[in-house]
Image: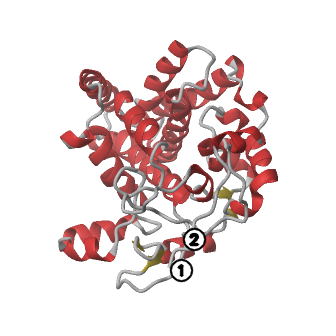
Amino acid sequence: MVRQRIDFPGVNTVRESIHSKERIRQFLPGLMSFTLPLLVWLVSLFGIVLLPWWAKIPLGIVNGFAIGVMFIIGHDACHGILFPRRWMNRLAGRISLMPALHPYAAWVHNHNGLHHAFTNIREKDPGFPPMDIAEYGKMSYWSRFSYRLGRTWYGLGWLYFREMWMKWEFFPSKARYPKNRKAFVRDRIQIVVFVALWIGVLVWGALESNENIFLMLGVGFVLPQFIWNWLIGFIILQQHTHPRVAWYSELDLPSPMFFQAQLHATPHLIFPFLFRFIMRHVMEHTAHHADPAIPLYSLSNAQKSLEHSYRRDIVRVVWTPRGFLKTLNTCKLYDYTNHCWTDYEGKPTTGCLYEKPSLSLSDS
């Protein structure tokens, strides 16, 4: 049974725990964050074209990671917080999302408009909502296989490609279309032209150097896309999936409050410093959901402030491979009635997660 509802800290109370200076958008930190991964992507791409065969695969891997970092930067630009000026953010967002083949209008609609407004609510949040045993049982063999593959450590790229890019970003159903359909069509055309240019450069390089065209396309386009999709699947799944994190349904009335969905359902996974630095503190994700106006270059300090006030109520975990595999093993399906994770047979793997935090303050 779900425990009796209590009052939770409201939006204003939570955001007051973070210093206002962390919301300041700065030009130079934004420019450095935007420029460096873009340069790495361009240099590695031309290295794939120009350098000998033995350098191409490592550069393809680097290129894929650069796409992932660019996407993280583009995420901030799409929120309008990377740079002080709106036009700068719009331009940086479009450029940063292009190598990831993401239309700008679709990402803004799905991420800003749906994910942040309906975090961890199954019917509306596109961020990998888990199925329940009834839904899973009605799926075809192929669909069950695809779902299970996507929740393995090696299938995270497939999870993102199929469940996010295919269904929400590039080939959405009419119900999932962005509100500005003209902008969405225009953005998709831009992506198609960009891909044609990208592939054209690789084909030209193969012909000029007398190399195999398919090998060049494999290491210069397919491999980077594979790497980046796995990386973003690895990141996004763990941002809202954990044995201590609840998911919700529109059947939950009243709906989960801000504190439950944005703080308690958004864990802070603590990675080694180098990963945090390269990935621009993307896993200090609780602070981002508490206040999406905080730029990535201020997330670390904002997360510390937030945890100083609400540490007992934030899922805070030092990331380890063992813990990661445990999460994947535990979080397969979700029982939305009893609010617990289950295995593929419907057997609970956690206790009830819809519990009251220890705090009982609310905004007046």
**Residue 208 shows up from this direction:** no
Q: Residue drawn 53% across and 57% down?
A: 240
Image position, residue 21 (x, y; %): 78, 28
Q: Residue drawn 53% across and 44% down?
A: 65
- Residue carrying label 1: 350
Q: Is residue 70 above or below residue 227?
A: above
Which residue type carries mark 2? Gln
For label 2, the crowd category at 10 Å Cα-Cα, with few meaning under 14, some 14 to 19 and many 20 or more, is: few
- Nearest the viewer among 198 and 293 is 293
- Nearest the viewer among 114 and 196 is 114
Foreground mark, 2 or 1, reads: 2
Q: Which mark is residue 4?
A: 2
Which residue type carries mark 1? Thr
Image position, residue 236 (x, y; %): 50, 52
Which image quadrant for residue 142?
bottom left
Q: Secondary structure at mark 1?
A: loop
For label 1, the crowd category at 10 Å Cα-Cα, with few meaning under 14, some 14 to 19 and many 20 or more, is: some
Q: Is residue 310 left or right of residue 328?
A: right
Q: Residue drawn 60% across and 24% down?
A: 35
- Nearest the viewer among 310 and 140 is 310
Q: Secondary structure at mark 2?
A: loop
Q: Which mark is residue 288?
A: none
Image position, residue 133 (x, y; %): 32, 77
Q: Is residue 212 above or below residue 26?
A: below
Q: Is residue 298 above or below residue 259?
A: above
